[in-house]
């Protein structure tokens, strides 16, 4: 929500950074001015805001690239750093200002002209401080303290469980959890002013809060509820008016409200509304809304925002039995989810915003209709929510907790309530938000302790967050945890038998019993390793450690091992990747090029199988959110696009398997393969198709069919050959003027990688960046 009347002075750009280890600070040292810092003789370098101290030290040549070689381990030596960011600025006119930090990492004291004006204690939300009346030259000093000083004030109690010792100190501080070390991110406890800083001229009368929510949809009408709040100075509130106008094409609504109270609600009825839909289900009309605050006819404020008219709901059962269900609905229609998990854009979050545009283009190109913002991350830049609004991509937003049972202390409850209130108010106007989720895997984390602890006793996700949402976004879907173990599921004795599951398991052959017999109606996480291309590996692994992968310290570090040794957490991950190649192709490649190609083929076939197992059984199964689109640092991982934006084979295979109209073959049953057509449009789709077996060049079947609206339709049967050979089926179709293609590999693992690669090339479906001959 932006006001035409707001005046800002940006403080982004050039600053100076002073830094020192905690142990090197003189006792009772106080550096609250530029002069004091200059006299301290502390080392200093030019700094950039938004930024982080690692980026500043890299630019100054003090440290090397934190992602290269063994350098990620050196970050641990800088976890005790104090940081002072300083700059001077000029205010031309005497006026009262607010100082707004969109993101400070994390605990900081803020001094303006030598006076402490406030502190920050949460990396994940903005902080607004009273800068007072300013004029002329001014000086700003931000002292950021090492995180351990705060975390040690909150000792871990017996009721707390975390998946690694690395993560214990993260639980009582509101800093992105992944920064303490995760299986997808390095341990880099960064610090800095990582989002923008600005001064805002203070006004006395303005619109402070507006929220237009869709509460009911009826044939020919939408019922909206406007929540408003205004700052006014007059004694008589009824002398003020709020005028609201929303338009999209020929559709229009308007309302004038006399303010008998500065805050309140007002119902608005929109006739023949233009409804917002996820991609392939319909269009994404965004109403442009203008709101004006007037006093006796004089305009005091005018704000603009966009909104979409839509309603998400969720039907779910407690357990995954024969009646198990977990299905999103949009505007009353069931939504089959084809989504991806979104992890940190960068281990150094100051770079998130610059990386977003290319990543968002990949998200859209991959055909996703939902993105899950994972709970170990920061809350994404609002431009990403704008993109999702515009492109019909629903958002599942975790609150920032993951893989632990968090402290149930008054301190934690208050911190989370403050954070959640800020987050909900910031993003709630976006129609793309389908659901808020309390956390990532914290319900099932209770089982990691091997004790009888009911996750429904978690006051953070069962009381604090529901209360915040009841107050500020009461009509949206809320899922207390992912996966969610409610009372019924807990009493069943099997915390993993919920309709929504994270399908990780042994990560062995992707057609093993763990995957083929999974009871999930909806998978909100599942993935498989894929090695980056050699050209990408050469950018983060030093030449002497390039190959082989065995006994390779740099490969281990870039599989997120933040300490070395066979027993270190995540030391298994490169061997896991190699074993997946061996299981599928029966070989241990002797060159990096072949290893990476075979690994990417293994990942591609696994991800394809996972997606098609769910799509071909629509509506028995209702969605899959695979893990994950793109890496946030250079590593060996499950991502289908590496940190340098090189697309792995799986990216292209997933894109084909996720097309809104797609043909696929179910696994053999009774000697027969069933050809299934999935259609994500809300209308029937006629198509022409044919299936070819590249093993012998035969056209097996061809025909015409009508795919049912928003359904999976069985089209034909193919007898399974009994010759024991590897068969490679290519399915081609044309529907609504768009051509499509998909493939299916019939054969028992292990089979020949060379034969697989030849068929993929022959069909034109081997696509992967960064290989010399691929």
Image (cartoon, grey):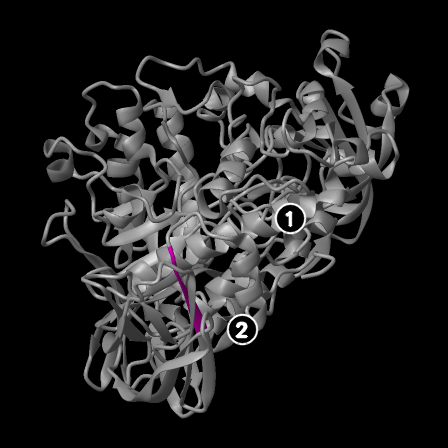
In which image quadrant can residue 734 be found? bottom left
Residue count near mark 2 (Cα–Cα under 10 Å), binned few <14, some 14–19, many ≥20: some
Q: Which label number is shown at residue 741?
A: none
> SS at mark 2?
loop
Q: Which residue is mark 2?
A: 763
> SS at mark 1?
helix
Identity of the residue drawn at 40% across and 39% down: 507
Start and end of the magenta stretch? 742-747
Identity of the residue drawn at 88% across and 33% down: 61
121 is higher (above) or lower (below) than 127: above
Report whether residue 236 is seen.
Answer: no
Q: Nearer the viewer, residue 68 or 617?
A: 617
Percent coordinates x, y for residue 348 in the rendering: 66, 40
Percent coordinates x, y for residue 85 in the rendering: 76, 34
Give the residue furthest to the front.
723
Identity of the residue drawn at 75% across and 13% down: 29
Question: How many marks on residues?
Answer: 2
Q: Quadrant of the C terminus?
A: bottom right
Percent coordinates x, y for residue 42 in the rendering: 85, 20
Q: Which residue is mark 1?
A: 594
Q: Main secondary structure of the magenta part?
A: strand
């Amino acid at each position: 929500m932006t006001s035409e009347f707001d005046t800002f002075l940006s403080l982004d750009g050039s600053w100076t950074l002073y830094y020192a280890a905690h142990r090197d600070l003189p006792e009772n040292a106080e550096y609250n001015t530029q002069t004091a810092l200059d006299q301290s003789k502390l080392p200093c370098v030019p700094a950039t805001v938004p930024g982080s101290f690692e980026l500043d030290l890299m630019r100054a040549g003090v440290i090397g690239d934190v992602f290269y070689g063994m350098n990620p381990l050196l970050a641990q030596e800088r976890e005790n750093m104090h940081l002072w960011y300083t700059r001077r600025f000029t205010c031309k006119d005497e006026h009262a200002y607010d100082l707004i930090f969109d993101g400070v990492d994390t605990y900081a004291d803020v001094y303006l002209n030598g006076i402490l004006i406030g502190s920050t204690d949460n990396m994940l939300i903005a902080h607004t401080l009273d800068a007072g009346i300013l004029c002329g030259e001014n000086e700003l000093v931000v002292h950021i303290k090492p995180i351990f000083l705060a975390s040690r004030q909150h000792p871990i109690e017996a009721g707390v469980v975390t998946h690694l010792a690395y993560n214990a100190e993260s639980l009582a501080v509101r800093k992105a959890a992944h920064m303490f070390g995760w299986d997808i991110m390095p341990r880099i406890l960064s610090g800095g002013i990582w989002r923008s800083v600005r001064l805002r001229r203070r006004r006395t009368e303005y619109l402070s809060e507006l929220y237009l929510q869709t509460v009911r949809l009826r044939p020919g009408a939408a019922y909206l509820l406007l929540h408003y709040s205004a700052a006014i100075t007059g004694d008589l509130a009824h002398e003020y008016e709020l005028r609201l106008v929303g338009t999209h094409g020929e559709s229009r609504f308007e309302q004038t409200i006399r303010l008998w109270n500065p805050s309140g609600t007002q119902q608005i009825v929109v006739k023949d509304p233009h409804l917002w839909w996820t991609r392939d289900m319909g269009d994404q009309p965004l109403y442009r809304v203008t709101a004006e605050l007037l006093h006796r006819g004089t305009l005091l404020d005018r704000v603009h925002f966009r909104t979409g008219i839509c309603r998400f709901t969720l039907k779910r059962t407690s357990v995954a039995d024969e009646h198990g269900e977990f299905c999103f609905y949009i505007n009353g229609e069931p939504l089959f989810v084809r989504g991806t998990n979104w992890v940190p854009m960068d281990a150094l979050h100051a770079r998130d915003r610059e990386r977003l545009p290319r990543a968002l283009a990949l998200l859209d190109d991959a055909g996703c209709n939902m993105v899950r913002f994972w709970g170990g991350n920061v809350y994404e830049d609002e431009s990403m929510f704008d993109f999702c609004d515009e492109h019909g991509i629903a958002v599942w937003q975790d609150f920032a907790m993951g893989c632990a049972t968090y402290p149930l202390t008054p301190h934690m409850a208050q911190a989370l309530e403050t954070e959640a209130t800020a987050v909900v108010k910031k993003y709630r106007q976006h129609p793309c938000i389908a659901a808020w989720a309390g956390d990532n895997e914290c319900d099932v984390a209770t089982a990691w302790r091997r004790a009888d602890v009911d996750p429904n006793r978690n006051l953070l996700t069962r009381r604090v967050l529901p209360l915040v949402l009841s107050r500020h976004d009461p009509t949206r879907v809320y899922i207390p945890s992912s996966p969610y173990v409610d009372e019924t599921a807990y009493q069943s004795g099997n915390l993993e038998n919920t309709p929504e599951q994270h399908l990780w398991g042994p990560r062995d052959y992707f057609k093993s019993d763990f995957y083929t017999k999974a009871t999930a109606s909806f998978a909100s996480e599942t993935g498989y390793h894929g090695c980056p291309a050699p050209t990408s590996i050469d950018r983060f692994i030093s030449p002497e450690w390039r190959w082989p992968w065995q006994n390779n310290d740099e490969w281990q570090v870039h599989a997120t091992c933040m300490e070395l040794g066979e027993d270190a957490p995540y030391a298994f991950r490169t061997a896991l990747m190699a074993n997946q190649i061996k299981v599928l192709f029966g070989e241990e490649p002797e060159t990096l090029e072949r290893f990476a190609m075979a690994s990417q083929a293994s990942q591609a076939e696994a991800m394809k199988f996972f997606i098609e197992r769910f799509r071909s059984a629509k509506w028995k199964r209702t969605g899959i959110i695979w893990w994950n689109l793109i890496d946030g640092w250079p590593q060996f991982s499950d991502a289908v696009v590496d940190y340098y934006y090189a697309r792995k084979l799986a990216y292209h295979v997933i894109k084909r398997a996720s097309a809104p109209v797609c043909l696929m073959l179910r696994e053999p049953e009774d000697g027969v393969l069933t050809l299934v057509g999935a259609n994500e449009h809300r209308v029937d789709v006629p198509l022409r198709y044919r299936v070819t077996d590249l093993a012998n060049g035969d056209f097996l079947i061809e025909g015409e069919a009508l795919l049912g609206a928003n359904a999976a339709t069985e089209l034909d049967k193919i007898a399974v050959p009994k010759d024991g050979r590897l068969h490679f089926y290519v399915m081609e179709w044309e529907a609504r003027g768009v051509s499509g293609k998909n493939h299916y590999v019939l054969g028992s693992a292990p089979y020949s990688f060379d034969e697989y690669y030849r068929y993929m090339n022959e069909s034109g479906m081997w696509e992967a960046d960064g290989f010399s001959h691929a």
